[in-house]
Amino acid sequence: MTDKTISAKNPLVIPVGLVGEEYGTITVEEGGYIDIMGSGGITIDNLKVVGELPFPFILVHAADAQSGQQGKKGIAGINGLKGTDATCNGPISMNDATPGTDGSDSVSGMDGTNGMIGLKSPDISITIKNITIADSLINRFTIINKGGKGGKGGDAYNDPSKGDDQWRSEQGGYGGEGGEYKCCGLTSSYGANGGNGGNGCKGDNGGNGGNGGNGGAVVMTVPAAYKNEFVTLCLPGEGGEGGKANFVGRGQYGGLGKLNRSARVTGRSGSFGDTQGTDGSSGSPGVKGSIKFN
């Protein structure tokens, strides 16, 4: 049977797993507490309090669930190619220029994934056979039983290096410039129109937050004289926050048109993506557990 001194910097931690711990005397110095994530039973022969207790003194809980993953990056549009320039055969026009090609549309990325569901807090029995408290102290023993928090939903892809455009999806490609006009002397070879700019893609969605975990069942056995000194609080696991969406991608400019037989025609600019991404929904809280005294 083990004796142990606990403090704010050196608490008694019961990790995840099946436990059957037995302690002789646990001496509680200033700020000492008990952190329980394992299921089973704990027996303490003597709880000796010599310092002020924190809130809570006993925390029975589950770990927070894993967050969803950030969405995958989309594919930016490819810029159009410049048209071939006009040519001459000596002083005579030979070939007019060709138009620039269109920029391609960008492709959306993948949505952020959902956060994981919070875990249930452990079912555990805690037996304290004897309690002694230093005369100078006025202490209340607080116990919290809390389910694990749901994981945060993954954000849509974002790139902090883009500054103001951190949360914007990929842009379309620029239209290619038209081929250049050329004066040949007696006649001229004419330029061509610019290509159209590519359209931006839709925004990507954020993942949903995971639901909070349920609380487990805690059964306390303490000396009858101290039952009223214990204050209990049962809390459900909080739902995880939803992930953040990103914005639609920008369309890009069309290519410049060059001097030709009619008007110079610059390619039209691409449009913004048609659908904004949607933020993920927050998860729902779990169900409260229980703390009962024998």
Image (cartoon, rainbow, N blue to C red):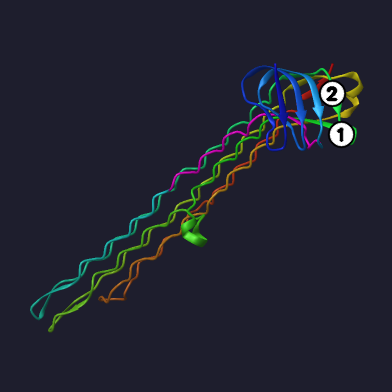
Circle 2 residue? 131
Taking the spot 60% from the left edge, 40% from the top edge, the residue there is 152
Question: Depth check: 41 or 21 in front?
Answer: 21
Quadrant of the rendered image containing residue 218: top right
Quadrant (top left, top right, bottom left, bottom right) of the C terminus:
top right
In this picture, is 7 found above or below 15? below
Asked if the stretch drawn in magenta spans residue 91, the answer is: no
Residue 210, image x, y percentages: 61, 35
Disc 2 is placed on an element classified as strand
The span shown in magenta is 53-73
Q: Amino acid at mark 2?
A: Ile
Can residue 272 be spotted in the picture? no
Q: Is residue 4 visible?
A: yes
* Residue receiving disc 1: 139
- Judging depth in this view, the residue of 251 and 287 nearest the camera is 287
Image side of residue 2 versus residue 162, left or right: right
> Where is residue 275 shown, x and y percent of the image?
52, 51
Residue 214 is situated, as x and y percent measured from the top left of the image, at 70, 27
